[in-house]
Image: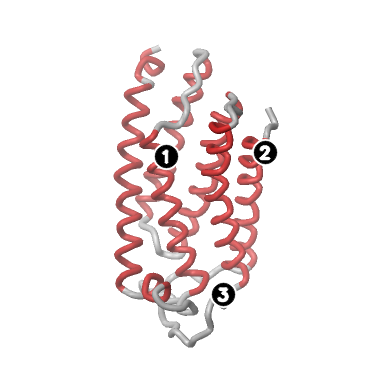
């Protein structure tokens, strides 16, 4: 059970704790009247100096978690280390990581409340379907649409965390992609792609698990 891919997955869960604690200790104040103190900062040439240490640690903990998401799956497939434990715990670790990030982004005003509710609802729904499948002796592994959904969600969260963690303290073109119109468009693309894929993959799981729902 505790092979290398599964160990990496468990490390990702530990990174969620680092992510949450870092933000709790040294978090960015929530937006006021739609404008945060982050947006008021101007680029001063201080490359890669974080706004706060807490946000910096949270960003890189999240990035490490996102990388581990792809790494454990790659290693499991390449070395034939796929286990039922991995099929169940890997998607669960993704859900915990993404949900924690979206809750925080809603708190600071960078993600609409309904989007976070939709994403968490989809995760609970799929988890319930998986539990029904397990009781029937079947393991429902993550499908391709679910993986794309996770990828878009991770990309959106990272883009927002870079914006919150470093604000204007980035060299070009990263500065424009973080603070400027380009950054707003990039985050919007990631966000709406996440919403569409969340709904699509959720419907796909419901269709695939309709026999368990009937039972």
Relative to 19, does residue 74 appear above or below in the rendering? above
| Picture disc at residue 136 | none
Q: Helix or strand or loop: what does disc 2 sit on?
A: helix
Which residue lies at the image location 57% right of the left edge and 46% below the top edge?
Answer: 68
Mark 3, other Cα within 10 Å: few <14 / some 14–19 / many ≥20: many
Instruction: For the residues labelled 1 and 2, say whether their Cβ atoms are less than 8 Å apart.
Output: no
Instruction: For the residues labelled 1 and 3, say whether their Cβ atoms are less than 8 Å apart.
Output: no
Q: Quadrant of the N terminus?
A: top right
Q: Nearer the viewer, residue 15 or 123?
A: 15
Q: Which residue is mark 3?
A: 50
Q: Which residue is mark 2?
A: 7
Residue 51 visible to the viewer = no
Q: Helix or strand or loop: what does disc 1 sit on?
A: helix
Mark 2, other Cα within 10 Å: few <14 / some 14–19 / many ≥20: few
Mark pair 1, 3: CA separation: 30 Å
Relative to 51, does residue 159 appear above or below in the rendering? above
- Across and down, in percent, residue 105 comes to 45, 59
Which residue lies at the image location 65% right of the left edge and 55% below the top edge?
Answer: 18
Q: Which residue is mark 1?
A: 147
Q: Residue furthest right?
A: 2
- Across and down, in percent, residue 11 comes to 66, 45
Q: On the image, which quarter does residue 27 sit in?
A: bottom right
């Amino acid at each position: 059970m505790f092979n290398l891919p599964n160990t990496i997955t468990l490390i990702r869960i530990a990174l969620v704790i680092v992510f949450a604690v870092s933000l709790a200790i040294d978090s960015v104040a929530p937006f006021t009247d739609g404008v945060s103190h982050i947006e008021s900062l101007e680029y001063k040439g201080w490359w890669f100096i974080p706004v706060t240490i807490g946000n910096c640690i949270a960003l890189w903990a999240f990035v490490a978690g996102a990388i581990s998401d792809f790494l454990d799956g790659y290693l499991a497939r390449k070395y034939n280390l796929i286990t039922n434990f991995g099929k169940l715990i890997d998607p669960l670790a993704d859900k915990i990581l993404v949900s924690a990030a979206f809750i925080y982004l809603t708190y600071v005003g960078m993600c609409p409340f309904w989007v976070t509710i939709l994403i968490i609802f989809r995760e609970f729904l799929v988890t319930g379907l998986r539990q029904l499948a397990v009781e029937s002796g079947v393991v429902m592994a993550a499908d391709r649409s679910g993986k794309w959904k996770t990828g878009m969600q991770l990309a959106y969260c990272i883009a927002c965390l870079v914006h919150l963690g470093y604000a204007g303290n980035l060299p070009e073109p990263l500065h424009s992609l973080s603070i400027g119109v380009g950054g707003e468009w990039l985050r919007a693309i990631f966000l709406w792609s996440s919403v569409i894929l969340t709904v699509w993959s959720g419907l796909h799981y419901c269709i695939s698990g309709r026999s368990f729902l009937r039972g």
